Image (cartoon, rainbow, N blue to C red):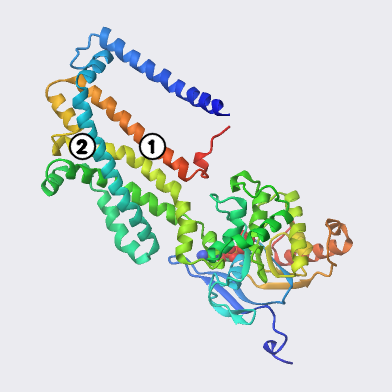
Amino acid sequence: MAPPSAMAPSYIAARDVTKVFDVRGRDKVHAVDPIGLTVDKGEFVALLGPSGCGKSTLLSMIAGLTPATSGDVVVDGRAVTAPLTDLGFVFQKDLLLPWRDVLSNVLVQFEMRGQRTDRHRETALRLLHSVGLEGMERRLPHELSGGMRQRVAICRALVHDPPLLLLDEPLGALDALTRDQLRIDIQRIWSRDRKTAVLVTHDIEEAVFLAQRVIVMTPRPGRIHADIPIELPFPRRLEVKETPEFLGYVRTIRQQFEALGVIHED
Amino acid sequence: MRTDVIRRALGNALWPFISFGAILLAWELVAQLGGVPDYMLPSVSQVVERGWETRDLLITHGRWTILEIVGGFALSALIAIPLGMVIVTSRLLERLLYPPIVALNSVPKVGLAPLFVVWFGFGMAPTIAMTALVTFFPLLVNTVMGLRSVDAEMIHLARVMAATRLRLFLKVRLPHALPSIFAGLKVATSLAVIGALVSEFIASDRGWGYVLVSAGGQLDTALIFAVMILLSAVATAFFYLVAAVERLVVPWHSSQRQPH
Ligand SMILES: Nc1ncnc2c1ncn2[C@@H]1O[C@H](COP(=O)(O)OP(=O)(O)OP(=O)(O)O)[C@@H](O)[C@H]1O
Ligand SMILES: [Mg+2]
């Protein structure tokens, strides 16, 4: 059998990555135990796991924002040693700059890179319109609802057309209806561009609805417990949630968590 | 729309007018009918009269004091705010500079006024130095805290957007810190008035502080009250001036939003 490196290279390859937080004066925290993870180009993968299991840490190591304690991460053929910049990152908080209007909060992506923004205005406006924010371009963040704000954050992560999208519980703070809408939006955008996407979530339905593969993580220290391909055809409409196949996946994953002791009935 | 704004402003001004009026009325009644000797508590009318008689003196000395207040405040802001920025950008500088500055802050600064006379002589220089000193710490601390309080995830976001340190500073940290810096500036306005006054008590033969001391020596209580009223008015105007600038500079901040 050929070693993994000789096979068709994955877009993201994390090899035996671990993370130990060594906060002075406290016990070491093993956030991530050896994890091996590969994501192919154009694939949508969900990292699913209980709170505190190291999902954000793993994502942050993939992006080069947090150095791994051991192991290595390769993205697009290059070892990650510094923050990646050719990606879009959406965090749980929208992180909009309160003094900038909606359009300018999207265009900040270029400003931060020292690029001129005028030639990207059209792209930004088109993106904003595509997620239902037409007429909101001049609003300040505090004039928007939480769902609108998160949409702006998503546009900001997409406007420079990055090949990779990292989403850290982007919908965690939203109500159920808005969440459904934004899941549809995210899926539409992903189906159109087929960017490689890694979504962190602790919502089983969200993972099954959006991803082609759901990776179930154990409680801290996070390891990969199961890697479940979701073979539901795209585009997935909300009705898919009532199909036996969908419910079957949700049940399988819930049983995994039960087996891990994350969920227990009594 | 416009008349609406004016009407609201007038409405807002009305209530403090009523409370101030009531206080003045009570004062006048106590002073006139309460059997308190004039040199203890002059009546409002006596204070107004005395203030009017001495208006030339009050204006000359007032100009001097206001100049010192604004000068010391500006000097302090011009040093403290940039210093705060420097401290935040470098861990080494922070460790080097911040602890001694915090330690120095525990010195009761007005006690240094006699020393400032020795160092800077008599008159405006020691007073500006004192005003700058008493306003320095809140300005520095508010700048440092404001710059530091940027969300760690915001910094991460800026890094994946390939932001340089300078751009992170100019486009994220500094605007984020402005509300905190303005909070410091507003606290500093009243401290500046105190600093200037205390310094004038001992280090000057000009200014309202000096007028207060000499009026006290002559039991000229009405003049003391007149000066105190003017000082309060100046301090209040100074505060609202800074608040107005704040409204222009950080209209987006939650503290600036009018509840409807
Ligand atoms: N900077 C840090 N210093 C010390 N410990 C940390 C740090 N960041 C994370 N941890 C710890 O590492 C563990 C994993 O954190 P992480 O944020 O990756 O979890 P998560 O899976 O994203 O959880 P959630 O779903 O609640 O966001 C947690 O126990 C956390 O306390
Ligand atoms: Mg997390």
Residue B241: mark: 1
The residue tagged 2 is B198
Residue in view at x 56 percent, y 34 percent: B259
Mark 1: which secondary structure?
A: helix
The kind of residue on which mark 1 rests is Leu
Amino acid under disc 2: Val
Say whether residue A83 is visible: yes
- Of the pair B198 and B122, the residue shown nearer to us: B122
* Figure quadrant of the C terminus of chain A: bottom right
Q: Quadrant of residue B42?
A: top left
Residue B204 numbered tag: none
**Quarter of the figure with the N terminus of chain A:** bottom right
- Relative vertical location of residue B72 with respect to residue A75 in this rendering, above or below: above
**Residue A254 appearing in the image:** no
Tag 2 subunit: B
Residue A43: % across, % down = 74, 72
Q: CA distance from mark 2 to mark 1?
A: 23 Å
Place of residue A22 in the rendered image (x, y in percent of width and height, measured from the top left)? 48, 70
Q: Residue at x 24, y 17 (%)?
A: B47
